[in-house]
Image: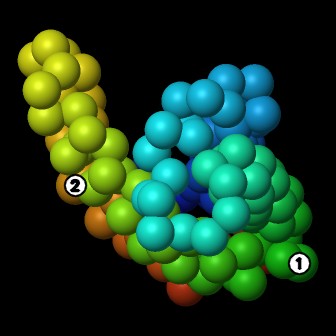
C-alpha cells in the first residue's frame, strides 16, 4: 500500500506498535542489542522504542511527515545490525524461530523503500 493516502498512517501504526512493544516486552529486544554498543541493552531497548514512537508521531502529522519518513528510513537501516545479531543467535533454534529471524533480514529493504516513498510523495497527506 505504499503510495496510498493511508500509507503514512500504516507505517506510523507499525512503528507505534513496535515502539510500545519495546516497553511492554523489553527482554526480547535486549537480547538482540549488539554487544559492541556502549551502555546496557535495556537502555538501547528503551531508546529505540522511544525513537519508534517519535517517528510514528512524526509520520502521523502532515507537517512533520517528510522529515519523519527520512528519519524512519535511516532508522530501519540503523537497526539492521540487531536483526543480523538475532539471525546469528537464533541459528540453532527450532525451524519456525530460525525462519522468523532470517525473515526479518530482507524485510528491512521494503521498510526503507516504504519510508523513502513517503518522504518523496507523502508530505501533507492525511
- Going from N to C along the chain, the mark reached first, 1 or 2, is 1
Q: Is residue 126 visible?
A: no
Q: How is the image coloured?
A: rainbow
Q: Position of residue 45 (x, y in %)?
A: 67, 48
| Towards the viewer: 107 or 28 | 28
Q: Mark 1 or mark 2, which is nearer to you?
A: 2
Local crowd size for mark 2, using a 10 Å CA cut-off: few (<14), some (14–19), many (≥20):
few
Q: Which of the 4 image quarters holds residue 26?
A: top right
| Towards the viewer: 64 or 20 | 20
Q: Position of residue 89 (x, y in %)?
A: 25, 40
Residue at 67% across, 54% down: 40
Q: Position of residue 24 (x, y in %)?
A: 75, 24
Relative to 108, 56 lies left or right: right
Relative to 13, 113 lies left or right: left
The C terminus appears in which quarter of the rendering?
bottom right
| Towards the viewer: 83 or 126 | 83
Relative to 81, 125 lies left or right: right
Q: Position of residue 110 (x, y in %)?
A: 33, 60
Local crowd size for mark 1, using a 10 Å CA cut-off: few (<14), some (14–19), many (≥20):
few
Q: Is residue 61 visible?
A: yes
Using the image, determine if residue 103 lies above or below residue 111.
Answer: above
Q: Are marks 1 and 2 in contact (CB under 8 Å)?
A: no
Q: Which residue is mark 1?
A: 63
* Disc 2 element: helix
Q: Which residue is mark 2?
A: 106
Residue at 61% across, 82% down: 70
Residue 126's disc number: none
Residue at 62% across, 70% down: 38
* Disc 1 element: loop
Amino acid at each position: 500500500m505504499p503510495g496510498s493516502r493511508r500509507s503514512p498512517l500504516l507505517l506510523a501504526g507499525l512503528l507505534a506498535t513496535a515502539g510500545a512493544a519495546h516497553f511492554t516486552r523489553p527482554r526480547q529486544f535486549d537480547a538482540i542489542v549488539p554487544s559492541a554498543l556502549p551502555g546496557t541493552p535495556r537502555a538501547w531497548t528503551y531508546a529505540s522504542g522511544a525513537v519508534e514512537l517519535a517517528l510514528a508521531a512524526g509520520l502521523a502529522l502532515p507537517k512533520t511527515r517528510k522529515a519523519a519518513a527520512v528519519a524512519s528510513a535511516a532508522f530501519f537501516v540503523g537497526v539492521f545490525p540487531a536483526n543480523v545479531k538475532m539471525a546469528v543467535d537464533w541459528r540453532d533454534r527450532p525451524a519456525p524461530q530460525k525462519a522468523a529471524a532470517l525473515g526479518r533480514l530482507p524485510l528491512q529493504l521494503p521498510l526503507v523503500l516504504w519510508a523513502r516513498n513517503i518522504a518523496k510523495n507523502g508530505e501533507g497527506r492525511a
